[in-house]
Amino acid sequence: MDRDQLVNVARAMVAPGKGILAADESTPTITRRFAASGIETSAETRRDYREMLFRSQEAISANISGVILFDETIRQTATDGTPLVKLIEEAGAIPGIKVDDGAKPLAGFPGEAITEGLDGLRERLREYFILGARFAKWRATIDIGENIPTAYAVEANAHALARYAALCQEADIVPIVEPEVLMDGSHDIERSMEVTEFVLKTVFMRLYEARVLLEGMVLKPNMAVPGKKCARQASPEQVASATLRVLRNCAPAAVPGIAFLSGGQSEVEATANLNAINRLGGPWPLTFSYGRALQNTPLKLWAGKFENLRAAQAAFAHRAHMNALATQGRWSNEQEKAAA
C-alpha cells in the first residue's frame, strides 16, 4: 500500500471548488434513463453519451475533480479511438470505477438489502488500476420503514464496505465509502438523522477494525433529508444544520473530504442544500458526487442526437459550475438564473 499516493489522490478528489461526476450507471439503470428520453440503448449510444460529457473539457477542468465509470465505460474508446479514460485525464480529472454488483435482497430480512461484489474484487482492482482507475466506489443502501433498518442489515453492509475499502487501499486505489440512507418513504428529518448517525458510526467502527487508512478514503454520505412522502419537508438551512450535526458526531476529521450524493433530489435542490451546508462548513472539504443531479437536463437535451450535443454540453457545464459554486457557499438563485 502506497500511503502517500492514497492520501494525495484522496485530497485531489476533494479539491477546493470541484466535485465528482458519477457516470457509473449500470447498463439496466442507464437503459431506463435512455428509454425515458426516447433513446435506444447499445454499447455505442452509451459510449456516445458519456463521450459527450467527457469532451466537455473546459467544464470538467474547472469544476470536476474525478469521474466514476462503469466497467463497460472504462474499457471503451471514443469515436476517434481515444480511450475514454484518456479524455478524462486530459481534462485534468481522475478516473474512478464502480466495483460493487448492486444491492440484492438480504435473506431473512424483508425490505432490506445487502450490496454484493466482494468475490474476486482483489483481482478486479488490479485490472482496474492498470486500466487507469485511481479510486473506486461501493454503494450500500439502507432503507427506512416500519421496523427497519435492523442492526443486522446495517452491520452487514458496514462490514462489506470495510472489506471493500481495505482491498482498494491494498491495490493503491482510493475507496469512496458510500453508505446511503435512502430518502424514499414518509420519515421526517429527525428519523433521517437518527438512522444516518447509527449507520455512519457503525461504518467507521468497521473501517477502524479493517485498518483502513482514513486519510486515504473519501466519504460519500446522504444528506439528512425527510423522506419524499413526508408532509413536512425541510429548507436548505434545516438540511444543512441536521446534516452537519450528524457528521460532526460521526466522521473523524482525518477523513480528507466528504462528497455528498444527491439521492434523488432535484438538480437545483441538491445544489441549494450543498450550498447551505458549505455556508455553515465543517472540518472537512464538503463537496458533491452527483449523478442524476448533474445529468438529468443534459441527457434530455441530448436525446441521442448529434445536433443536440452542444446544447447538452452547455447544460452539463452549467450544472457543474452551479455545484462548484455551492462547494464554496457562493451559489444563489440569482446566479442560477443568470448563468443559465
Image (cartoon, rainbow, N blue to C red):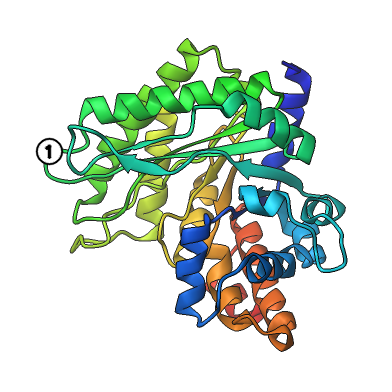
- Disc 1, SS: loop
Which quadrant: the C terminus?
Answer: bottom right
Please identify the residue farthest to the left as the structure is shown: 146
Indicate the position of residue 173 as horizontal and vertical percent values.
Answer: 68, 29
Indicate the position of residue 299 as horizontal and vertical percent values.
Answer: 58, 74
Question: Looking at the image, which residue is at 31% across and 24% down?
Answer: 155
Taking the image as shown, residue 205 lies to the left or right of residue 219, namely left
Q: Amino acid at mark 1?
A: Asn
Question: Looking at the image, which residue is at 79% across and 54% down?
Answer: 88
Question: Looking at the image, which residue is at 23% across and 45% down?
Answer: 144
Q: Is residue 232 above or below residue 39?
A: above
Q: Which residue is mark 1?
A: 147
Which quadrant: the N terminus?
Answer: top right
Q: Is residue 69 visible?
A: no
Q: Is residue 126 visible?
A: yes
Q: Is residue 125 above or below residue 132?
A: above
Which sits in the foreground, 26 or 65? 26
Total marks shown come to 1
Question: Looking at the image, which residue is at 37% across and 52% down?
Answer: 239
Q: Is residue 111 above or below residue 56?
A: above
Please identify the residue farthest to the bottom as the structure is shown: 307
For disc 1, the neighbor class at 10 Å (few under 14, some 14 to 19, many from 20) is: few
Taking the image as shown, residue 157 lies to the left or right of residue 62, namely left
Indicate the position of residue 333 as horizontal and vertical percent values.
Answer: 53, 73
Which sits in the foreground, 310 or 133? 133
Indicate the position of residue 136 as horizontal and vertical percent values.
Answer: 62, 37
Q: In which quadrant of the rendered view does residue 137 lie?
A: top right
Which sits in the foreground, 217 or 70? 70
Q: In which quadrant of the rendered view does residue 320 lie?
A: bottom right
